Amino acid sequence: MKQPLKMDQQFVKKTNWLLTKKILFVCAQLLFLFFLYKVLLMGFVDWKNDPDKHVYYSATALSFKNPNIEGLETSEIKNMNLLGTNEIMYTLNKRIGDSTEEHVIIEMTIPIISSLSTLEVERKVRQEDGEDEFYLPNDPWTGEKITALVDESDWKELEMLHEGTVATMNFSVNEYMTPERLLQTLQGIDLAVLWMPLNTGEFNGFEPNFTHHYETMLSITDRIGIAPSRTRTHSSNFTSEVTTQSAGLEITLDTIDEDKENMLKNMSHMLNEPLKLINIDHLPNRYEFLKEEGFSVYGATVTGPVKELLKLKEIPQVHNAKVTDVSYWNWTSRLTE
């Protein structure tokens, strides 16, 4: 009577072992399929919706829209979920003298359907009202020159600062100039030009979405400007290739032709990017205007020693200077002997 019971136990053990082997085999197959799915998904996403490309163009667009934002992403965190949605975070810097510090944090969500992408920008320090405003030299409706209001407050602030400090400031000019002419006007002053607001045909073919009136003066808050060059080195490698001077990037007479050329190239590629990641209003109109009419500016963002920045006050075209940042001395002279 005991013999059948022993055989039954052996049969159960054998059955359990076979069942365990089958379960392990199925689990191994599932793990392999999951790994294969992840590999194929990553390859498909990189082919269809390259996250590096979106980082490159969103950073470049932000450097066009915002004075003193270096379009070089300093850090990057990537995470892709099982549906192929990429979550990316990176930071962009600002310049004060020759030093840089984190200025904005960008978070992007890019699903496989890239038109559903989202972008959020968070500033590390709250921006003061009017800090980044540049005033138009002419009335866009009549063409008449706008008389700038005299505001001495920021010049007085510079005068009170110790000469062992550096600062970053914005200023407007009372006429449209080519970038080359403005750079020539600033020659002889030991500073670096970081950004210049552009006339991109606002009120001439399209209405800007946001403007601000200050007494008789008018500023466009959704304007774009020319920034130091960014270029793609290869169609599958979207790292920046730029000319580095001292501790950072700047616009000079030697680089301005390349800066303009690369800006137009980048804008033409941005036309095919998801609008929510670029977020430049009327981009096709602006691109066509710059391509046909050329580049003209009406101000600049500059950085340098405070005593050098005070020399800008003596330039007749300069008005409404605004100091945005101040730091301890960190500067290498740009003037040649």
Image: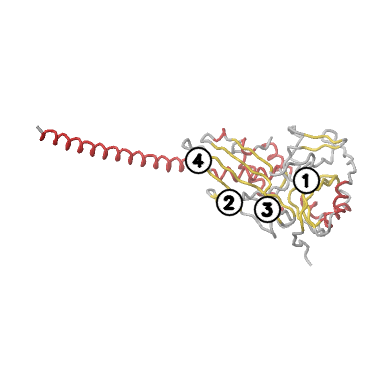
Q: Are marks 2 and 4 in contact (CB under 8 Å)?
A: no
Circle nearer the viewer, 1 or 2:
2
Disc 1/disc 2 C-alpha distance (Å): 28 Å
Q: Amino acid at mark 3?
A: Glu
| The quarter of the displayed image where residue 266 is located | top right
Residue sitting nearer the eye, 297 or 37: 37
Of label 4 and label 3, which has the lower sequence position? 4
Res. 297 mark = 1
The residue indicated by pointer 2 is 239
Circle nearer the viewer, 4 or 1:
4
Q: Is residue 321 above or below residue 4?
A: below
Could you say where residue 315 lies in the image, as x and y percent from the top left?
87, 52
The residue indicated by pointer 3 is 258
Q: Amino acid at mark 1?
A: Val
Could you say where residue 244 lies in the image, as x and y percent from the top left?
66, 58
Circle nearer the viewer, 4 or 3:
4
Q: Residues within 10 Å of mark 4 (few under 14, many from 20)?
A: some
Of label 2 and label 4, which has the lower sequence position? 4
